[in-house]
Image (cartoon, grey):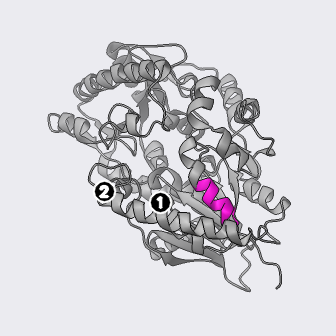
């Protein structure tokens, strides 16, 4: 049998945060001859026993993924991994404990890093098993680059039509305001809440309460502006909706990628939020509201790339100044150097292209991974079917972390036609992907391939 390219398996957990970037990566891979499977992470896992052997692009390496990684390897898939959460993270010891595990790291064939600092952290992990680490950047940043961001021009115009002028308040209180009650305890990688996590949750709870007090202050101070609160994808909206009911100019919206919202707003207000890093790339003024501070518990990178304030009075004064065209003076060059230490591919080849380069250099474009032994494949198949059956039951359990309600909160339904329209927009923006086509593979899962004879390069 002739050699064939490995299937690239691209799982998406939070659609609004990850989909566009992973669709770009999928298009690049398809353009170079990889058959691609892209879709909801949960539903990709249900189908993984029937997907031709290939490379699974893991978005995390937590202990919770150890069983799934074992299934993937038994079925003959190889694993290339990066950590979606590694750009803004806890200090190394706590990060290693919460986001990495010896078991998952041993099953990974290669690691992709956001930047120099991420590569250092991966290499320093006591359980690092020697997999090659390549600094590629992340396609999420690709979508914000000046040569790509106009992909969102239509969405930016629509947002401004609805809300402009507006201030964007991005929240990230998943630990304290999760869509599922007590999620921190049941999803803590099987660990009890140690001293660090207990202190972190208390610290974030104080900031959460301060943000609930701060939003009305902004609403009253800026009556001619809309204050748009965009909760994190895993947060409940209820606390913010309660505030919005009391103030006509407060809106709670979590629609689509954050990028067009950052492009459309006048200023971003946050605390320790990745959106401040994204805003810096997009040249959107960002204010870090830090009513309390705690070394080792505040995420330094997004706050350092922002203008910092420590009270509502300071916040009101600074936001008014920015809205009036008088932003404070900052050392942009120093901030840019700091960002470049954490994020690669801000210029030059896209991170998506660099990631596919790694796959090609490893030979995956020419061959599939070696077949697993029949016994191992049977074990992987049985475990997949058993795991899927259990998950199917849990999907029907309200309030469970695997419930269909929570799944649909993070991954609203899409059609192949929806994705094809986005592929076509990407193609027009970049002058690529003319022959890339999307078709439905199964529920919440899609196949993306280059049509024969339609090379987009």
Assign a secondary structure to mark 2: helix
Q: Is residue 224 left or right of residue 123?
A: left
Q: Is residue 422 left or right of residue 253?
A: right
User: Is 182 situated left or right of 290 in this image?
Assistant: left
Q: Over which residues does the magenta segment extend?
A: 68-77
Residue sitting at x 69%, y 69%: 375
Q: Residues within 10 Å of mark 2 (few under 14, many from 20)?
A: some
SS majority, magenta:
helix
Q: Nearer the viewer, residue 32 or 253?
A: 32
Is label 2 in contact with label 1 (beta carbons under 8 Å)? Answer: no
Q: Of the numbered discs in the image, which one, if any, rests on residue 42?
A: 1
Which residue, given by chain and number where applicable, does mark 2 sit on? 405
Q: Nearer the viewer, residue 328 or 91?
A: 91
- Of labels 2 and 1, earlier in sequence is 1
* Residue 388 spot, x, y in % from top left: 46, 64
Q: Is residue 75 magenta?
A: yes
Residue 10 position (above or below residue 222): below
Instruction: Name the quadrant containing residue 311.
Output: top left
**At x 25% / y 29%, what residue is drawn?**
219
CA distance for labels 2 and 1: 13 Å
Residue pictured at 57% horizontal, 42% vertical? 63
| Residue reaching furthest to the left | 246
């Amino acid at each position: 049998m002739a050699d064939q390219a490995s299937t690239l398996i691209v799982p998406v957990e939070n659609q609004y945060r990850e989909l566009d970037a992973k669709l770009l990566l999928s298009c690049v891979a398809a353009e170079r001859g990889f058959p691609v499977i892209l879709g909801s992470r949960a539903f990709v896992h249900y189908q993984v026993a029937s997907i031709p052997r290939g490379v699974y692009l893991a978005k995390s390496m937590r202990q919770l993924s150890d069983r799934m990684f074992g299934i993937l390897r038994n079925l003959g898939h190889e694993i290339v991994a990066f950590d979606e959460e590694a750009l803004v993270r806890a200090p190394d010891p706590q990060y290693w404990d919460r986001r990495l595990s010896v078991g998952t790291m041993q099953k990974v064939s290669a690691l992709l890093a956001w930047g120099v600092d991420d590569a250092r952290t991966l290499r320093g992990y006591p359980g690092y098993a020697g997999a090659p680490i390549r600094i590629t950047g992340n396609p999420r940043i690709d979508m914000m680059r000046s040569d790509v961001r106009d992909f969102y021009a239509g969405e930016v115009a629509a947002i401004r039509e609805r809300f402009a002028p507006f201030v964007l308040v991005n929240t990230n209180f998943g630990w304290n305001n999760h869509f599922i009650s007590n999620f921190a305890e049941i999803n803590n990688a099987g660990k009890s809440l140690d001293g660090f996590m207990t202190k972190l949750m208390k610290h974030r709870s104080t900031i959460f309460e301060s943000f609930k007090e701060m939003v009305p202050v902004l609403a009253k101070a800026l009556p001619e502006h809309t204050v748009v609160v965009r909760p994190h994808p895993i947060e409940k909206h209820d606390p913010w909706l309660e505030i919005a009911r009391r103030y006509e100019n407060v809106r709670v919206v979590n629609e689509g990628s954050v990028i067009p919202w950052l492009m459309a707003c006048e200023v971003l207000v946050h605390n320790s939020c990745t959106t401040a890093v994204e805003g810096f790339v997009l040249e959107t003024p960002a204010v870090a509201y830090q009513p309390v501070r705690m070394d080792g518990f505040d995420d330094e990178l997004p706050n350092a790339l922002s203008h910092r304030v420590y009270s509502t009075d300071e916040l009101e004064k600074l936001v008014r100044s920015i809205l009036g065209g008088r932003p404070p003076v900052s050392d942009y060059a120093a901030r840019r150097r700091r960002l470049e230490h954490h994020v690669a591919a801000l210029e030059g080849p896209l991170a998506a292209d660099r990631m596919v380069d790694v796959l090609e250099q490893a030979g995956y474009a020419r061959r599939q991974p070696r077949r697993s032994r029949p016994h191992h494949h049977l074990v992987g198949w049985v475990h997949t079917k058993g795991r899927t059956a259990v998950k199917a039951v849990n999907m029907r359990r309200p309030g469970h972390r695997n419930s269909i309600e929570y799944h649909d909160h993070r991954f609203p339904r899409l059609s192949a036609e929806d994705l094809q329209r986005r592929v076509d927009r990407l193609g027009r923006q970049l002058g690529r992907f003319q022959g890339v086509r999307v078709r439905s593979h199964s529920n919440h899962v899609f196949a993306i391939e280059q049509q024969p004879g339609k090379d987009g390069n």
